[in-house]
Image (spheres, grey):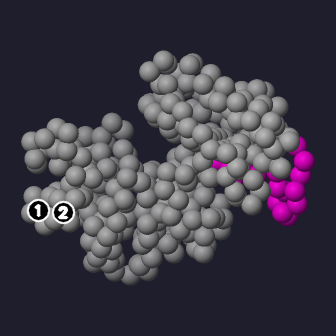
Amino acid sequence: MRHVIALDVGGTGMKAALVAQDGALLHQSRRATGRERGPEAVVEGILDFAAELSAHGAEHFGEPASAAGVAVPGIVDADRGIAVYAANLGWRDIPLRDLLAERLGTPVALGHDVRTGGLAEGRIGAGQDADRFLFVPLGTGIAGAIGIAGRVEAGAHGFAGEIGHIVVRPGGSPCPCGQRGCLERYASAAAVSEAWAAATGDPGADAADCAKSVASGDPNAVRVWQHAVDALADGLVTALTLLDPRTLIIGGGLAEAGDTLFTPLREAVRGRVTFQKLPTIVPAALGDTAGCLGAGLLAWDLLTTTDGTEVTP
């Protein structure tokens, strides 16, 4: 059975799959990224994991993978196939596409994790009926993927979609990026966890705990939560003013709060728009599989010409 390798590399773990042409997941596997062993060990671990997946496919499906797609965090030069920088993995200027292609003997596509996840949400997830969408996962930080007619815009230098670094509170909390008042310092899952831990005096309290307390009517939790929602709405309205998306897809850990997030967020965004068209605001559909599924799409795209004709590597 013809298939591709899909690999989603995170700060602490890697998710992988063998993906058939119809999108079926033929095999799935996970393992630790191993960042505590250093960047060289992380790269070697990625190469070994991909080689094991290739061997599994050859053994169980009668042929090796036709291509591979890999999504990685940080700054990515997808055109040259280079993982430029990732603070949480400690690497710089890794020619990951070429290293994987040499190990596997197949074509390899390299992509940015959020943009790759957005590609999957746009084609087979919550944005599949939208010609223009913005995918915003709310995790440790906040990034965005700008979807346009079935593809995701990377920008001139690969930095498009960095919505988490829109300044929503000028002169506010310092951000590791060097600015003050960035959106992700107020509305990421990490920021909500930090604020809720401070409000409760419990260093172990997190955003999920805050959401539960909001649902139960705790006024302190409602205050912390609304502070984050207001900041998020400010950032999103700036983004939709610039991009005019038809659908706004919210994912990541904070979106798991469901209506506790989406009800006040829709209200806050609606209250801020004036001339702008209000997009449909929906939860992401693919959860933590989006990056892996998107990596599979990148791989299949390598095997399809611009007119939709399949090619053989």
Q: Is residue 185 visible?
A: no
User: Which residue is painted at 86% across and 41% down in the image?
Assistant: 63
For the view shown, which residue lies furthest in the front direction? 60
Report the number of discs.
Answer: 2
In the image: residue 28, left or right of residue 225: right
Judging from the image, what secondary structure is the residue with disc 1 in? loop
Viewer-side residue, 292 vs 127: 292
Residue 6 shows which numbered tag? none
* Residue under the point 41% across and 54% down: 252
* Residue situated furthest right in the rendering: 312
Circle 2: element type = helix
Q: Which residue is mark 1?
A: 218
Identify which residue is drawn at 70% across, 49% down: 26
Residue 108 sits inside the magenta stretch: no
Label 2 sits on what residue type?
Val
Q: Which residues are magenta?
A: 294-313
Classify mark 2: residues with Cα within 10 Å, few (<14), some (14-19) or many (20+): many
Q: Which labelled disc corresponds to residue 214? A: 2
Residue 126 in picture, x, y percent from top left:
53, 68
Q: Image check: 218 left or right of 134?
A: left
Location of residue 235 by image quarter: bottom left
Q: Amino acid at mark 1?
A: Asp
Q: Residue at x 81, y 44 (%)?
A: 61
Q: Is residue 120 above or below residue 3?
A: below
Alpha-carbon distance for marks 1 and 2? Answer: 6 Å
For the residues bearing labels 1 and 2, Cβ distance under 8 angstroms: yes
Q: Nearer the viewer, residue 29 or 161?
A: 29
Q: Is residue 307 rendered magenta in the image?
A: yes
For label 1, the crowd category at 10 Å Cα-Cα, with few meaning under 14, some 14 to 19 and many 20 or more, is: few
